[in-house]
Image: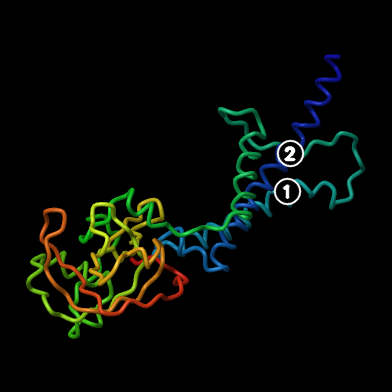
């Protein structure tokens, strides 16, 4: 019985190097797939695209090289040896038995192929807390420039403007035209909603939402959460939840398709 067990263990050990190769190649393909299908922007900041692309090609190169080394004895037409075990890599101390970590990596890669990245929702925005200021975590802060025409400012431009000069009365009656997704904050009256965008500083894990209140002429129930809108109107100052802040007094709200890349930077 012991001999049978050792034999099975020996066969299993011979598969470990191939599991490593499969895991490395699978992750290389997955990273490049995110890039080629334009899904990479849903996961990381564009400044780091090159790192992911380089890593994807690097993993494919390493995986292909390891596979070549293990196949060399067969390609050189050496005599067939029963129970041939491919050359083993150096042994390292691990928390898992040999092969288990590779199986975990392969499983994670397969899930990556089956499950497409999804953008954050309004519920996640509420959980993370929507702000009208930029967090001081930007990888490379952009130069601040004020658009000559307020209507040319995006939602993020308005937030940057408030970040520099937060007095809301300075912008009263200025025209505004912005795009974003709808949030229904429970602390705001029924005739108010938030128009919001997520900003990525490094990767999706550190994305945070920014937004501005929008005053409506009717109930916000007309616009479901996560609906993307083009909002036009003018700026006014109101006190909401005990805070004086800039509010968009909307005169036009038009549903628009969800952008290909809904995040800003």
Outermost residue to the bottom: 149
Do the residues under discs 2 and 1 have CB atoms within 8 angstroms? Answer: yes
Spot occupied by residue 238 in the image (x, y as percentages of width and height): 12, 65
- At x 42%, y 76%, the residue is 256
Q: How many residues crowd mark 1 within 10 Å: few (<14), some (14–19), many (20+)?
A: few
Q: Nearer the viewer, residue 122 or 155?
A: 122
Tell me: 218 left or right of 106.
left
Quick one: label 2 or label 1, which is nearer the N terminus?
1
Number of numbered discs: 2
Spot occupied by residue 76 in the image (x, y as percentages of width and height): 85, 51
- At x 60%, y 29%, the residue is 96
- At x 17%, y 85%, the residue is 148
Label 2: which residue? 87
Residue 101 occupies which quadrant of the picture? top right
Q: Secondary structure at mark 1?
A: helix
Spot occupied by residue 261 in the image (x, y as percentages of width and height): 44, 69
The image quadrant where one finds the N terminus is top right
């Amino acid at each position: 019985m012991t001999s049978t067990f050792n034999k099975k263990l020996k066969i299993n050990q011979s598969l470990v190097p191939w599991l490593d190769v499969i895991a490395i190649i699978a992750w290389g393909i997955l990273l490049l797939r995110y890039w080629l299908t334009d899904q990479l922007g849903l996961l990381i900041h564009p400044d780091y695209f090159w790192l992911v692309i380089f890593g994807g090609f690097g993993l494919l190169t390493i995986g292909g090289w390891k596979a070549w080394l293990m196949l060399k004895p067969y390609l050189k037409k050496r005599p067939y040896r029963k129970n041939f075990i491919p050359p083993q890599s150096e042994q390292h101390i691990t928390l898992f038995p040999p092969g288990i970590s590779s199986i975990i990596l392969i499983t994670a890669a397969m899930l990556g192929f089956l499950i497409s990245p999804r953008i954050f929702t309004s519920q996640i925005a509420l959980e993370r807390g929507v702000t009208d200021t930029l967090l001081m975590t930007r990888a490379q802060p952009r130069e601040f420039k004020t658009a000559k025409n307020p209507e040319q400012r995006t939602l993020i431009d308005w937030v940057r403007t408030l970040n520099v000069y937060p007095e809301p009365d300075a912008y009263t009656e200025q025209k505004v035209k912005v795009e974003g997704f709808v949030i229904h904050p429970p602390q705001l009256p029924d005739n108010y909603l938030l128009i919001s965008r997520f900003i990525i500083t490094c990767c999706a894990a550190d994305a945070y939402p920014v937004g501005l209140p929008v005053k409506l002429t009717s109930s916000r129930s007309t616009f479901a959460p996560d609906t993307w809108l083009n909002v036009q109107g003018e700026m006014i100052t109101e006190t909401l939840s005990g805070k004086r802040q800039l509010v968009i007094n909307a005169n036009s709200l038009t549903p628009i398709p969800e952008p290909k890349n809904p995040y800003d930077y």
